[in-house]
Image: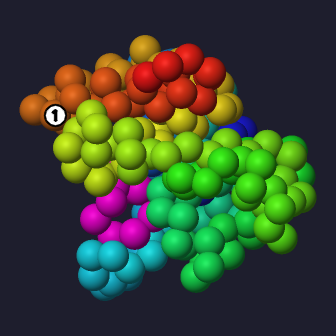
Amino acid sequence: MKEIRWHGRGGNGAFTAARLLALAASVYGGRYAQAFPSFGPERRGAPVLGFTRIDDEVIRDHSEVAECDCVIVLDETLVSVADVFKGLKPDGTMVLNSVRPEKALRKEAGFAGLKNLTALDATGIALKVLRSPIVNTVMLGAAIAATGVIGIADAEKAVEELMPSLAESNKRAMRAAYETVKGGNP
């Protein structure tokens, strides 16, 4: 089973990204998946969590993800207010929205010990492609490229289904991040 934790702020789409990943894996990828949020009555901008589980067998565990294979951080400022490293497996992957290069991040305490770190300027991609700082589909594309947990085509189908009026621009943003992480040009 692959377990993924999404760190975001209310309003920037962390739970939507978790749902898109689960939809892509289950409906279009033929696997079992679940997505669920963890937040209370917080307002826009407050830290929130989202979770996605993906497996080839029925998922019976509906508890919060304690140990995860991947942590996706949609807002770098959360590193100083939430324990984004907690429960990340030793061979796990962190995908971080940051303008700082991976090499600079690895000089900091929490990042130094990470085996797999992917950092990209998701906000810059979102502003360029979507003309909005909402980075959920951008970070989804980056996470898919960094982990290979699902195929990008399945994610594009999920975007078409879950956000039909915004599908084309969000697919472009997701693909731009995917290509950036894979080493191509967006």
Q: Identify the residue position indicated by label 1 in the image.
A: 166
- Residue 60, image x, y percentages: 62, 49
Q: Could you say whether the residue bearing mark 1 is in a helix, strand or loop?
A: helix
Residue 172 to residue 73: above or below:
above
The answer to whether residue 31 is seen in the rendering is: no
Instruction: Tell me what residue is drawn at x 30 percent, y 52 percent.
Output: 134
Q: Nearer the viewer, residue 13 or 172?
A: 172
Label 1 crowding class (10 Å Cα cut-off): few <14, some 14-19, many 20+? Answer: few
Q: Is residue 57 left or right of residue 130?
A: right
Residue 177 to residue 16: above or below:
above
Instruction: Tell me what residue is drawn at x 71 percent, y 48 percent.
Output: 102
- Residue 36, image x, y percentages: 45, 57
Q: Quadrant of the C terminus?
A: top left
- Residue 125, image x, y percentages: 38, 39
Which residues are drawn in magenta? Answer: 8-17
The answer to whether residue 14 is seen in the rendering is: yes
Instruction: Tell me what residue is drawn at x 80 percent, y 56 percent.
Output: 106
Instruction: Tell me what residue is drawn at x 56 percent, y 17 percent.
Output: 184
Scheme of image coloration: rainbow
Q: Quadrant of the N terminus?
A: top right
- Three-letter code, disc 1: Leu
- Residue 32, image x, y percentages: 55, 32
Q: Is residue 112 left or right of residue 159?
A: right
Residue 36 to residue 9: above or below:
above
